[in-house]
Image (cartoon, rainbow, N blue to C red):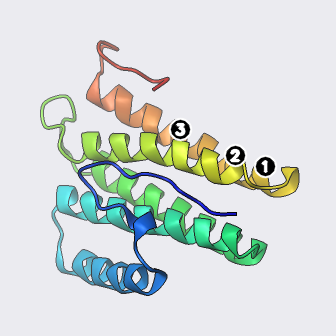
Amino acid sequence: MAISLCACSTRPNVFSEQRDERLRRFDRERERLERTNDPVRRTKIYIRISDLMISFIGDAVQMEDSEMMEDKLEGYRSTIRKARNTMLNSGRDASLKASGFRDLEIALRQHVRQLGDIGSQLTFEYRETIETVISEVSEVRDELLKALFPDGENATPGN
């Protein structure tokens, strides 16, 4: 079961890279994360890490390794929570300084689609696990949209 998912044009398509290269990039991103305290930079690194985590989830599905899939899903979930917390606790007004907030919202929108594509390849039992994560990601995305558009104008929660 091959997984062909496209990535946003502003981020590399991790699905076209070999697993070894993705693992090396994962380690480099984690090192970068340790070297910065800037919330926007940290969030962008978390986004790149979460992109890689989704590719690892896809690998696990392709290998039919449910234990690895669940482990990578939890890593992805944790990464997204950290990105969310970084921006929401940054003290930045998202409606005035959208960088970081907007980047994360766009990434999460893409992730929902990618996780849905991955989930469609699974049996009902494992699809439910991914659907739970999709629901959590959607909630985080909604929080970001509310921060970006506090008056509800121009927000597109369904996209």
Disc 3 crowd, CA 10 A, few/some/many (<14, 14-19, 20+): some
Q: Quadrant of the N terminus?
A: bottom right
Q: Foreground: 90 or 104?
A: 104
Residue type for callout 1? Glu
Gap between marks 1 and 3, in whole Å? 15 Å
Q: Foreground: 132 or 86?
A: 132
Q: Foreground: 49 or 21?
A: 21
Q: Position of residue 100 (x, y in %)?
A: 23, 48
User: In the rendered image, which residue does mark 1 sit on?
Assistant: 128
User: In the rendered image, which residue does mark 3 sit on?
Assistant: 138
Residue type for callout 3? Ser
Image quadrant assignment for residue 70: bottom right
Relative horizontal placement of residue 26, taking residue 63 as reference (left or right): left
Going from N to C along the chain, the mark reached first, 1 or 3, is 1
User: In the rendered image, which residue does mark 2 sit on?
Assistant: 131
**Are the residues tagged 1 and 2 within 8 Å (C-beta)?**
yes
Going from N to C along the chain, the mark reached first, 3 or 2, is 2
Q: Position of residue 12 (x, y in %)?
A: 30, 62
**Residue drawn at (60%, 67%), measured in percent from left and top?**
57
Mark sitting on residue 70: none
Vertical order, 103 against 80 (above or below): above
SS state under label 3:
helix
Q: Position of residue 61 (x, y in %)?
A: 69, 67
**Residue drawn at (26%, 39%), measured in percent from left and top?**
102
Gap between marks 1 and 2, in whole Å? 5 Å
- Circle count: 3
